[in-house]
Image: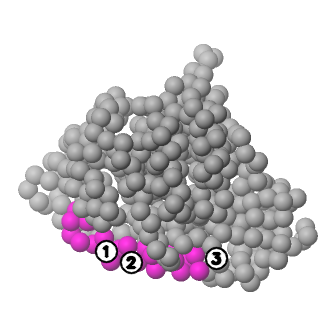
């Protein structure tokens, strides 16, 4: 058979992990702490049904939804991003600097198109979101992990790695990080923006979870400290509206966004107009504030249930992150235990999680004793049952 391009074997390992990630969602009989999806009860089904019915009867909108649109995105949705998502968070964005993407991941992929050559280094957190590693590896970039602690990137380590590798990009998820649930502190956000400026390296700030805050105080984004255009802010509608609608956006300096337009037309022309119209109308009709309250109630309740269940059932040797928001907690067993090896036993007993080893890039120790527990899709009573299953297996090994 004709050989595939060099990219395809290069991303083999991360692609295999991502495949498991998607397939772990499907078995209805298993309590799955694996999927990073929002609660099904938090999807705005009724509002979307109402908007869909109304919209086709409005003059001209039906045609607009079924027609080609602007590669930058639907004007109404770009305005929604500006008015409802960026400005309220103190980001002095301009409408012209916002481009709509096909889900958050396409934003990251477009940025990779702009910057990455084979062999380029991308500095990532340790651990980090595995699907983005897959994307960077599609461009044959080398992902190097940088030490983190409970407050995010260790800044001295980040600077050392910048000097050592002269990276093209730094990738960071500063708020309720995937997979750790941790949040980068204010001081470190400022420091990351400052390093980017000093060493002339681009930072991707990936921020899909910051709206899902259940406790603590909101922090300014890294982008808000950027005075030189070195930070590209990428976000998604997947966790606050619908992952199936595949909508996201990028906010960056004009020249970057202009080149993203070119990448967009060269790859998929434009983002789905149908879902953009529905999503924009959802915000324009004023549904978002109440919806966000509901998202926080549902997921915050699940976060609390997970924290209580871990405290009730896990042996003293196990530690975990108490996230102030998002969908994940990072649970660490004693370091001689492998979460990968325990998984088949946990699955046989009716639960599943993602072993920690899947979230590490080259350059830092792989913490296979840790696991990612995602609480978004599991009702509180079932969370307790799932944690008991995991805890029983862990206790049997101690
Ligand atoms: C940190 C992070 N970035 C990007 C994405 C991708 O988002 P989307 O589903 O909108 O492509 C996810 C999804 O889980 C994520 O956790």
Between 123 and 128, the residue placed more toward the observer is: 123
Taking the spot 22% from the left edge, 50% from the top edge, the residue there is 95
Instruction: Examine the structure image and report whether residue 67 is included in the region drawn in magenta.
Output: no
Specify few, some or many for label 2: CA neighbours under 10 Å numbering under 14, 14-19, or 20 or more. few
Q: Is residue 223 above or below residue 161?
A: below
Give how far apart the Cα atoms at labels 2 and 1 are. Answer: 6 Å
Direction front: furthest residue: 198
Answer with left or right where residue 212 lies relative to residue 26. left
Answer with left or right where residue 226 lies relative to residue 83. right
Q: Position of residue 260 (x, y in %)?
A: 34, 35
Answer with left or right where residue 393 lies relative to residue 145. right
Report if the CB atoms under discs 2 and 1 are less than 8 Å apart.
yes
Q: Which residue is mark 1?
A: 289
Q: Position of residue 62 (x, y in %)?
A: 17, 52
Q: Is residue 281 above or below residue 287?
A: above
Q: Which mark is residue 306?
A: 3
Specify few, some or many for label 1: CA neighbours under 10 Å numbering under 14, 14-19, or 20 or more. few
């Amino acid at each position: 058979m004709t050989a595939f391009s060099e990219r395809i074997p290069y991303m083999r390992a991360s692609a295999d992990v991502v495949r498991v990630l998607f397939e772990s969602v499907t078995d209805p009989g298993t309590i799955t702490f694996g999927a990073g999806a929002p609660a099904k009860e938090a999807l705005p089904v009724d509002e979307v049904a109402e908007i869909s019915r109304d919209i086709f009867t409005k003059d001209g909108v039906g045609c607009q939804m079924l027609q080609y649109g602007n590669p930058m995105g639907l004007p109404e949705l770009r305005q929604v991003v500006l008015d409802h998502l960026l400005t309220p968070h103190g980001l002095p964005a301009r409408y012209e600097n916002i481009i709509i993407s096909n889900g958050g991941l396409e934003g990251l992929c477009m940025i990779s198109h702009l910057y990455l050559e084979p062999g380029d280094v991308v500095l990532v957190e340790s651990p980090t979101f595995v699907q983005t590693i897959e994307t960077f590896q599609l461009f044959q970039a080398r992902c190097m992990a940088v030490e983190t602690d409970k407050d995010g990137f260790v800044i001295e380590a980040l600077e050392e790695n910048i000097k050592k590798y002269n990276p093209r990009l730094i990738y960071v998820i500063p708020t309720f990080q995937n997979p750790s649930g941790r949040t980068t502190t204010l001081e470190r956000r400022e420091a990351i923006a400052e390093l980017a400026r000093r060493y002339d390296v681009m930072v991707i700030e990936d921020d899909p979870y910051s709206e899902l805050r259940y406790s603590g105080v909101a922090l300014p984004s890294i982008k808000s400290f950027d005075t030189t255009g070195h930070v590209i802010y990428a976000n998604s509608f997947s966790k606050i509206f619908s992952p199936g609608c595949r909508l996201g956006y990028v906010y960056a300096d004009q020249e970057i966004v202009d080149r993203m337009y070119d990448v967009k037309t060269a790859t998929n022309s434009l983002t789905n107009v149908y879902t953009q119209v529905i999503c924009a109308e959802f915000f324009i009709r004023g549904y978002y504030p109440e919806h966000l309250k509901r998202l926080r109630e549902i997921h915050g309740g699940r976060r609390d249930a997970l924290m209580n269940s871990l405290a009730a059932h896990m042996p003293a040797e196990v530690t975990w992150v108490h996230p102030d928001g998002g969908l994940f907690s990072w649970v660490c067993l004693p370091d001689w235990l492998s979460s990968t090896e325990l998984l088949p036993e946990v699955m046989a007993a009716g639960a599943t999680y993602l072993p920690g080893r899947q979230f590490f890039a080259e350059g830092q120790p792989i913490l296979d004793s840790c696991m990612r527990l995602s609480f978004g899709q599991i009702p509180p009573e079932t969370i307790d049952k799932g944690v008991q299953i995991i805890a029983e297996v862990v206790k049997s090994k101690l």
